[in-house]
Image (spheres, helix red, strand yellow):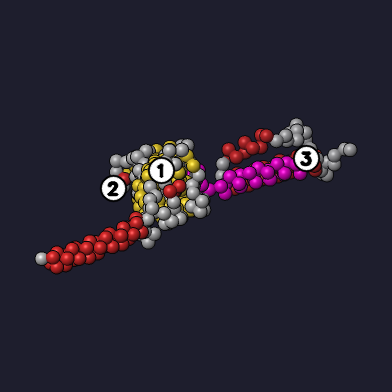
Amino acid sequence: MRAEVMPGNCETREQQGFDLRRGIALHFLDLIGSESEFQCLQHFQFPSYRRRCWTVTEMAGTLGIFGLCLLFAGVQMTSGMTVTIPNQVYKVARGDKAVIPCVFTPSTTITSISWTADPDNKDDPEINVAGYFSGGNKIAIYKKYKGRANIVLDLVKGTANLELLSVTNTDTRDYECKVQDPEDEEGRLSDKANLMVLVAPSQPKCDIFGKTEYFENIQLRCLSEEGMPSPVYKWQSYSVNNAPRPLPPKTTEQSGVLSLLNISMDTSGYYICTSTNEIKSATCNVTLRVDPPYMNLASTGGIIGGDVAVALVVGIIICCFYSRQKA
């Protein structure tokens, strides 16, 4: 089917089409403020400029192309500053170097970039760690972090990574990266992440609580004073011949406490506790010896001993009495 040509004198229509295209282009430039945005137009196929007249369909297509370019330019214009820390949690072993990355949209109007830390008490002001200031084009490290904090900055690539050397337990907290850009008030200008300093479990201490006698209930306790995240405890049992065996029936195990009920000679043996977190593990052990109830044996012995003593006293009195009679 033949395309419908715009009515009227052909030269007039050509001039009208040119004026329309020129008007759209000037308005488009006024909106986006840069001729570079017209690069998007080169990716589209325009109707032939050698033709003196454009069809209605071709003119509509041209308007559509300008509309698409305007849409793309609008998206670019409204995309403001974005500050992102890739992960929510960063884990590092105590004594090592921690690196928390911060990625932002590059901009020539950035005035400052700062790293802060949450205080121990939520009602206290945030803790200043380090900052970059465009005025002096320098990085400042605040007093508390002097000598062990730094910002690795690349304004072109849009990165401001925080480095902390020789981290300790007290460095476990939330950290925030903030970018100040007076030309951008609508973007996402900050982001947060948690730094978790991991500590291997300290050597646990194993203890026995309760009387280690037949039919008694006792506890074996295992505790590491240090460990981040908190250690998980696991008890293992070995016979007196050092052979592994399951824990006795009705045994309960919780948070490093092993409860042994109604113990007997069969409960005797070696018990090993392992304290573990994602860094490493440590162990301690106890030797359990279950004996007959000493108090009962002592009571029986006391009764027998008392009877013997009474008999001896009576015997001595009788002997003395008969000795006097003979005298």
Question: Mark 2, residues whose alpha carbon is within 10 Å: few (<14), some, or many (≥20)?
Answer: few
Q: How far apart are marks 2 and 3 (CA)?
A: 68 Å
State the residue in front, 299 or 35: 299
Prevailing SS of the magenta stretch: helix
Query: Which residue in the rendered view is the most extreme toward the front?
Result: 326
What amino acid is at disc 2? Answer: Lys
- Please tell me which residue is depicted at 75% across the width and 41% down the height of the picture: 61
- Please tell me which residue is depicted at 79% across the width and 38% down the height of the picture: 53
State the residue in front, 11 or 252: 252
Question: Mark 3, residues whose alpha carbon is within 10 Å: few (<14), some, or many (≥20)?
Answer: some
Task: Return the mark for residue 58.
Answer: 3
To which residue does mark 2 refer?
A: 143
- Please tell me which residue is depicted at 41% across the width and 43% down the height of the picture: 270
Query: Which residue in the rendered view is the most extreme toward the right?
Result: 1
What amino acid is at disc 1? Answer: Tyr
Q: In which quarter of the image is residue 242?
A: top left
Where is residue 116? Give x, y as percent.
38, 50
Between disc 3 and disc 1, whose residue precedes? 3
Query: Which residue in the rendered view is the most extreme toward the left?
Result: 327
Q: Is disc 3 placed on a helix, strand or loop?
A: helix
Task: Return the mark for residue 270.
Answer: 1
Q: Give the range drawn in magenta.
A: 60-86
Q: Is disc 2 placed on a helix, strand or loop?
A: helix
Q: Is disc 1 placed on a helix, strand or loop?
A: strand
Where is residue 244? Give x, y as percent.
47, 39
Q: Is residue 235 magenta?
A: no
Where is residue 220? Give x, y as percent.
40, 51
Q: How far apart are marks 3 and 1 (CA)?
A: 92 Å
